[in-house]
Amino acid sequence: SQQGEEDPQALSIQEGENATMNCSYKTSINNLQWYRQNSGRGLVHLILIRSNEREKHSGRLRVTLDTSKKSSSLLITASRAADTASYFCATVSGGSYIPTFGRGTSLIVHP
Amino acid sequence: DAGVTQSPTHLIKTRGQQVTLRCSPKSGHDTVSWYQQALGQGPQFIFQYYEEEERQRGNFPDRFSGHQFPNYSSELNVNALLLGDSALYLCASSPTRFRSYNEQFFGPGTRLTVL
C-alpha cells in the first residue's frame, strides 16, 4: 500500500520557472523524504524533513511540512532541463524505519 | 567510492522460471533493502537484510526470497515467475548507525521482463 500521494501526477514547465509538487499522507510520520528518479533508474535522495520541522532548504530545493494537514511540498526554483525526472515523496512512520513511497510526480522542464 | 551496484541491468524470463538478482552495497553500508517498482508506480518495499538475516518484510509472497552474504552483498530470488513480476527491482543500502534517519542509497536497478 502507498502512504503518500503526490500531486500533480505530471507537470510541464519552461526552464527558469519554479516547480511545486505536493505530497499528502494518511498517518502520523517520523520523517518525510523526497527522492528524484531519472528515466526509470535508481532513486536519488534529495532531502529529509523530520516531523518537528516545518521547512528545509537545499540549494534550489525547498521543502515544507504541515503535519496538521498531513502534507508536504517540494519547490524547485529556477528549474533547468536537467531537473526533468520523476519525484517521489516517502514517509517513515512508527518503528519500521522503512520509507513508504507515493506514485510520484513526473516533471518535464522544457529548454 | 563505488555506490550501490546491481546486476544484471536487464533480464528477460518466461513464466514459471526462477530469477536471481544481485546487489553490492555502498562501501561502509551493512544494511540492504529491496524494492519492486512497477511501471508508473512508486517503489514497493520487499524486504531488508542486516547481519545476514531478513529483518523486515513487506507484503510480498514467499516466492520472493533473499540472502545476504558476509561481505554485505545481497541476492533477491523470485520463484515461479508471473507476468505481474515484470518490474524494475531496486536495491538500496544504508549504514545501520543511521537506521532511524534512514537515508538510503539506491542502485540503478534491474529491469525484469517476464514473458
Image (cartoon, helix red, strand yellow):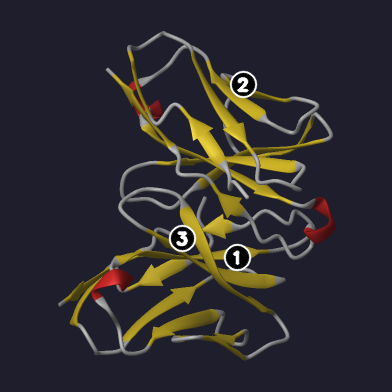
Q: Which residue is mark 3?
A: A102
Res A29 visible: no
Pointers 1 and 2 in contact (C-beta within 8 Å): no
- Label 2 crowd (10 A; few <14 / some 14-19 / many >=20): few
User: Residue A7: which quarter of the image?
Assistant: bottom left
Report the chain holding disc 3: A
- Label 3 crowd (10 A; few <14 / some 14-19 / many >=20): many
- Label 1 crowd (10 A; few <14 / some 14-19 / many >=20): many
Q: Which mark is residue B62?
A: 2
Q: Residue at x 30, y 73 (%)?
A: A8
Question: In the displayed structure, would residue A19 be above or below residue A97?
Answer: below
Res B57 visible: yes
Q: Which residue is mark 1?
A: A91
In the picture as drawn, the residue positioned furthest to the front comes out as B1
Question: In the displayed structure, would residue A34 be above or below residue A102?
Answer: below
Q: Position of residue A5 (x, y in %)?
A: 44, 66
- Is residue B24 rendered to the left or right of residue B36? right
User: Residue B39: which quarter of the image?
Assistant: top left
Report the chain holding disc 1: A
